[in-house]
Image: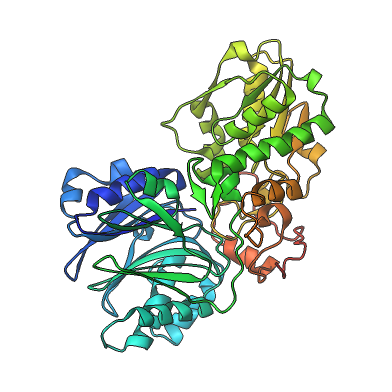
């Protein structure tokens, strides 16, 4: 999960891209980078850290030009601790290219060998985004061979990229002296939208980026589609994939995206309200509402679901946790030890809301279980009589290989465990999960035109249709394993993993 943005404008874009990255900060806190273009020259600054820490006044002054792109990163491939792997990435031929990428290539290892042996291109990092950049550069070189670049050439190159790479990818790239190209994988797994203003064109991961910078959402980039924006701001669209099916990542709506974004025609906020409706039905079928004194959300993504659930069940809704906004999201912190320690730094209880009460805590999802375990104990320490826990998402049982940092099976608390076993592990008095089909219906009803969703972390069905146990083991190779031990895929079964 990363956040990307690209802009072609009539005025300098350095401040505009900086402001856009602040609005995408929730999508990545490991590193940030900006590239601008003036004439045929690129100007780049990138480093590890939050946007506000990476860019100082001197850095911003060194980023002139009326077009550019940026990224906030959290790593799911490559070395999380290497500053070299911060994006954007650059190659000098053809023309000069810079690129930012949100997603995860599932065949990056094979492509590295192919690029070296056949295309004679060198990859200097472990990042799959550098692989993607070099594939794009090679395909662009094949169709142009030094001639003047036309939109049709760009689209032909993207068509070649689609034919070679697998996995999830939303991409924005700059071609020196020509313009900006953006494209999305044939399944539309990772989000990408485009907007306009009087000053120009912006492409970004989420619509909130457009809203916050005075751009009006035009539409989403379609699965397999490419957009080329020349330096005058003229837009050209073309479908570049032979076979497409629109299956966005459902976890975007559950947790990743900001609630004020609209993605693929679906309001993230309304999606979370709908999840609260279906979760309320699950609660009623599991636990009499009379056993619950108060509904308390676990900040922040769960609030809409918790409010809707409380309203439908006729129960008081209260804020019981205060969040320290200056501590990073525990979900994207490396290592169970750091994650566990940060929970009590991140959240503090309002004791009066717990003391002597049976509380229903509502979370957006339960991934590793470490945070949930700590929060349940915090509620007990605050004097709660009983602590029930409801998840607006189903059990996360399978690895994600499309760009979310939860690919190791043994990191998942629900992997190969029953709901009762998960409840015992977390330590709550009752555990209620969302139903997979109900989740898909609750969100999918907001845009019936979608073919479906990638919900592979919940149902084990990988929409690209090419993921095997061996792929998962390879993708996890070199990752920092959790404190609970080495990864073991021998007990992992993938239902219908070869078909979408």
The answer to which of 338 and 248 lies nearer the viewer is 248
Q: Position of residue 203 (x, y in %)?
A: 38, 58
Left or right, 326 with reference to 178: right
Identity of the residue drawn at 71% across and 49% down: 441
Q: Visible in this render: residue 28?
A: no
Q: Quadrant of the C terminus?
A: bottom right
Q: How many marks?
A: 0
The image quadrant of residue 495 is: bottom right
Q: Visible in this render: residue 438?
A: yes
The image quadrant of residue 467 is: bottom right
Identity of the residue drawn at 74% across and 25% down: 313
Q: Position of residue 52 (x, y in %)?
A: 30, 41
The answer to which of 193 and 63 lies nearer the viewer is 193
Q: Position of residue 53 (x, y in %)?
A: 29, 42
The image quadrant of residue 470 is: bottom right
Left or right, 460 with reference to 228: right
Identity of the residue drawn at 55% across and 44% down: 268
Left or right, 84 with reference to 282: left
Left or right, 116 with reference to 46: right
Q: How is the image coloured?
A: rainbow
Q: Position of residue 377 (x, y in %)?
A: 66, 24
């Amino acid at each position: 999960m990363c956040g990307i943005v690209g802009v072609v404008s009539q005025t300098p874009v350095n401040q505009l891209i900086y402001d856009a990255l602040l609005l995408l900060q929730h999508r990545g806190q490991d590193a940030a980078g900006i590239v601008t273009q003036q004439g045929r020259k690129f100007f780049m600054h990138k480093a590890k850290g939050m946007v506000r820490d990476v860019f100082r006044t001197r850095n911003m002054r060194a980023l002139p030009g009326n077009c550019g792109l940026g990224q906030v990163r959290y790593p799911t491939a490559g070395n999380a601790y290497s500053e070299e792997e911060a994006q954007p990435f650059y190659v000098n031929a053809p023309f000069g290219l810079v690129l930012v990428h949100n997603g995860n290539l599932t065949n990056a290892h094979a492509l590295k060998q192919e690029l070296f042996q056949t295309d004679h291109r060198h990859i200097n990092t472990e990042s799959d985004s550098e692989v993607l950049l070099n594939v794009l550069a090679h395909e662009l070189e094949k169709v142009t061979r030094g001639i003047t670049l036309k939109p049709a050439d760009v689209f032909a190159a993207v068509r070649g990229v689609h034919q070679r790479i697998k996995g999830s990818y939303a991409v924005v790239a700059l071609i020196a002296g020509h313009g900006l190209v953006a494209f999305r994988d044939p399944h539309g797994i990772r989000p990408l939208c485009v907007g306009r203003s009087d000053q120009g064109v912006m492409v970004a991961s989420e619509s909130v980026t457009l809203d916050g910078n005075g751009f009006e959402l035009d539409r989403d980039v379609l699965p397999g589609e490419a957009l080329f924006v020349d330096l005058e701001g003229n837009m050209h669209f073309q479908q570049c994939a032979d076979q497409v099916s629109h299956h966005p990542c459902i976890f975007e709506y559950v947790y990743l995206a900001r609630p004020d974004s609209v993605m693929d025609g679906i309001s993230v906020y309304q999606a979370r309200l709908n999840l609260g409706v279906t979760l309320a039905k699950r609660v009623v079928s599991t636990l009499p509402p009379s056993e619950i004194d108060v509904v308390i959300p676990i900040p922040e993504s769960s609030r809409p679901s918790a409010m809707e659930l409380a309203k439908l069940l006729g129960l008081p809704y209260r804020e019981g946790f205060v969040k320290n906004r200056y501590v990073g999201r525990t979900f994207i912190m490396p290592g169970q030890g750091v994650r566990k320690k940060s929970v009590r730094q991140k959240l503090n209880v309002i004791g009066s809301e717990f003391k002597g009460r049976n509380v229903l805590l509502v979370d957006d999802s339960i991934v590793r279980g470490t945070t949930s375990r700590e929060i349940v104990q915090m509620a007990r320490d605050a004097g709660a009589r009983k602590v029930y826990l409801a998840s607006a998402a189903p059990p996360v049982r399978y690895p994600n290989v499309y760009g979310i940092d939860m690919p190791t099976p043994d990191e998942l608390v629900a992997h190969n465990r029953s709901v009762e076993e998960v409840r015992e592990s977390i330590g709550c008095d009752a555990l209620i999960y969302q139903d997979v089909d109900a989740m898909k219906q609750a969100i999918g009803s907001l845009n019936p035109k979608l073919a479906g969703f990638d919900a592979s972390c919940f149902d084990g069905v990988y929409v690209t249709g090419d993921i095997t146990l061996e792929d998962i083991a390879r993708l996890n190779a070199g990752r920092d394993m959790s404190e609970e031990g080495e990864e073991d895929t021998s007990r992992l079964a993938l239902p219908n993993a070869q078909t979408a």
